[in-house]
Image (cartoon, grey):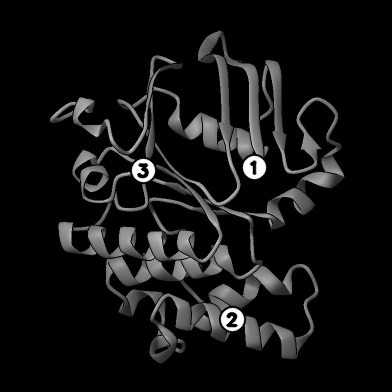
C-alpha cells in the first residue's frame, strides 16, 4: 500500500531522512517513534506528498513521488487522512461544519455530506456535540473532531502526528483506543508519538527513527526493547 525505496530528504543543506526503505501494509497499525528531529513528521509528510524526496521514491496506492503531477496531489490526499497534535479546527465553525468542510471543498452532494458527517461523528462518539463550537470542547474532544474530519473521506490510511501530545494521560489513552477501533474496521493507521507508555499499552509494529535513519523495527512481541523514557 505504501512503500519507501531508499528515500532521502535534504532541505536547506540539512539532511532530514537518509536512505529510508519501508513498507506499510493494508490495514496495518504502525508506530513511528524517535527523539524530536528524528524524522517522524518528515516521513509522514512524504506519505501525503506535502514533501517530495530529494532521492528515492515513495509509492502511495497508485501514486509515485517520482512522477506525480501537482494536480493529482489533492486526489491522493482524499485517500489519506491526517491528524495533527494541535487539532487545526476552524474556530468560527461548529463541530458539524468543521467536518463538513472537508466534503464541501470537493463538491459532495448535501444529502451524502450530512449522512457521512453524522456517521463519523457517531464513530468518534460526538454526535451529541455536533453543534458545539471548538472552544467549548475539551482537548480530547477536539482531537476526536479532528479524527472524524480525517475519516469523513473514507481514507485507506490515517496518519496521526503526535495526536496525544497536548492531552492528559486519560484522554491520550481514549484517543489511542479510538485509533485502534478505526484500525480494526479496516483503515490502516500510522502514528508518530513520543509516548512510549501508550505503545506498551497497545502494542503494534514500531519503527524507531534516529537522526533521519531507521534504527530498528520491532514487532509487537519485542517492545521491551523500547527505552523506558525518551
Would residue 42 be found to the left or right of residue 134 on screen?
A: right
Picture coordinates of residue 34 (x, y %)? 33, 27
Residue 128 shows in this picture: yes
Would residue 7 be found to the left or right of residue 41 on screen?
A: right
Residue 118, placed above or below residue 47: below
**Which residue in the rendered view is the most extreme toward the top?**
13
The residues tagged by marks 1 and 2 sit, at their Cα atoms, a distance apart of 22 Å
Badge 1 vs badge 2, beta-carbon distance below 8 Å: no
Residue tagged by mark 3?
204
Residue tagged by mark 1?
48
Q: Quadrant of residue 139?
A: bottom left
The residues tagged by marks 3 and 2 sit, at their Cα atoms, a distance apart of 29 Å
Question: Which quarter of the figure is the N terminus placed in?
Answer: top right
Counting residues from the N terminus, which is met first, the one under dot 1 or under dot 2? 1
Task: Kindly identify the residue that appears in the image at 64 percent across and 59 percent down.
Answer: 155
Residue tagged by mark 2?
117
Where disc 1 sits, the SS reads loop
Task: Kindly identify the residue that appears in the image at 23 percent across and 64 percent down.
Answer: 171
Where disc 3 sits, the SS reads loop
Near-viewer residue (229 or 165): 229
Residue 151, placed above or below residue 56: below
Amino acid at each position: 500500500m505504501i512503500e519507501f525505496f531508499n528515500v532521502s530528504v535534504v532541505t536547506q543543506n540539512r539532511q532530514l531522512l537518509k536512505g529510508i526503505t519501508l513498507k506499510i501494509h493494508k490495514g496495518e497499525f504502525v508506530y513511528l517513534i524517535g527523539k524530536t528531529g528524528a524524522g517522524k513528521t518528515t516521513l509522514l509528510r512524504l506519505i501525503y506528498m506535502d514533501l517530495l524526496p530529494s532521492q528515492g521514491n515513495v509509492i502511495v496506492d497508485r501514486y509515485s513521488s517520482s512522477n506525480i503531477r501537482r494536480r493529482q496531489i489533492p486526489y491522493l490526499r482524499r485517500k489519506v487522512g491526517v491528524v495533527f497534535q494541535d487539532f487545526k479546527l476552524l474556530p468560527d465553525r461548529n463541530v458539524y461544519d468543521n467536518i463538513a468542510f472537508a466534503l464541501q471543498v470537493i463538491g459532495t452532494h448535501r444529502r451524502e455530506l450530512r449522512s457521512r458527517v453524522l456517521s463519523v461523528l457517531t464513530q468518534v462518539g460526538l454526535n451529541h456535540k455536533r453543534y458545539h463550537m471548538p472552544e467549548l470542547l475539551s482537548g480530547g474532544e477536539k482531537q476526536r473532531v479532528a479524527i472524524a474530519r480525517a475519516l469523513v473521506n473514507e481514507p485507506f490510511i490515517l496518519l496521526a502526528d503526535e495526536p496525544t501530545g497536548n492531552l492528559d494521560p486519560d484522554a491520550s489513552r481514549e484517543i489511542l483506543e479510538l485509533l485502534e477501533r478505526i484500525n480494526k474496521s479496516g483503515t490502516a493507521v500510522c502514528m508518530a508519538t513520543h509516548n512510549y507508555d501508550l505503545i506498551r499499552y497497545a502494542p503494534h509494529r514500531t519503527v524507531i527513527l534516529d537522526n533521519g535513519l531507521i534504527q530498528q523495527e520491532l514487532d509487537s512481541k519485542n517492545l521491551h526493547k523500547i527505552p523506558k523514557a525518551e
